[in-house]
Amino acid sequence: MTARTGLPRNPGDPDARQLVERTIRVDQAGEFGAVRIYEGQLAALRWTGRGKGETARKIAGMAKAEREHRTTFDRLLAERRVRPTLLSPLWSVAGFALGAGTALLGDKAAMACTVAIEETIDEHYAAQAAALGDDEAPLRSTIERFRADEIAHKSEALAAGAEQAPGYRPLTEVIKAGSRLAIWLSTRV
């Protein structure tokens, strides 16, 4: 029997259509937010004269991948006629501020931000892929492909010394909590 998205369902769970809409909505919002975080980091690196360094190069590469992800979800929003989150203006400002703030704390703090975000997105994408049945195999495949990119970003940030950032544990825990809240809100609003 072919698995169906949204099945088996518990009372109160979204139906298959709602699940797909929520998935596309939150993923487009998340990729938009990721782009804004990297834009904020790159701006802060330029402001502090570190715009041509190794960290800026790494962040620019990650930002390029996130822009490609966002473009895919922008297209899916239109193709599937899914309403985007109403919170995009907030995510634009919050993402840029988070990016700029962490980069102003230093290169390792910028990388710590990437680790926190990508760990949260890894978990989020894994749960989404598990919830999508064979009827949504192309969407599931896209999510799994993007998840692999996010895991690679996390690995690159760890290799760049993210865990050596001052206050690494509390910094990453706060960013993860904020990311989880943004995911929850963007799924629904």
Image: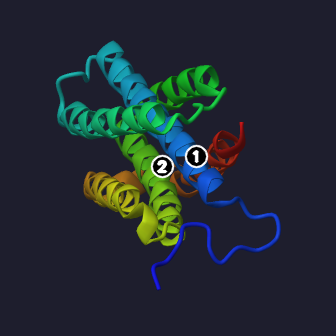
Q: Nearer the viewer, residue 188 or 98?
A: 188
Query: In which image quadrant can residue 13 be found?
Result: bottom right
Res 34 visible: no
**64 in relation to 173, above or below:** above
Q: Residues within 10 Å of mark 2 (few under 14, many from 20)?
A: many
Q: How many dots with numbers?
A: 2
Q: Which residue is mark 1?
A: 21
Give the colour scheme shown.
rainbow
Please give left or right for residue 55 compared with residue 25 in the image.
left
Report if the CB atoms under discs 2 and 1 are less than 8 Å apart.
Answer: no
x 35%, y 13%: residue: 47
Q: Which residue is mark 2?
A: 117
Please give left or right for residue 81 compared with residue 184 in the image.
left
Residue 165 in the image, given as x and y percentages of width and height: 43, 49
The secondary structure type at the circle numbered 2 is: helix
Residue 99 in the image, given as x and y percentages of width and height: 46, 30
x 71%, y 59%: residue: 14
- Tell me the number on the disc at residue 145: none
The secondary structure type at the circle numbered 1 is: helix
> Tag 1: residue type?
Glu
Furthest residue toward front: 1
Q: Nearer the viewer, residue 115 or 131?
A: 131
x 48%, y 55%: residue: 121
Furthest residue toward bottom: 1
Ranked by sequence position, the earlier of labels 2 and 1 is: 1
> Tag 2: residue type?
Ile
Residue 78 in the image, given as x and y percentages of width and height: 45, 30
Residue 176 in the image, given as x and y percentages of width and height: 58, 52
Q: Nearer the viewer, residue 47 or 3?
A: 3
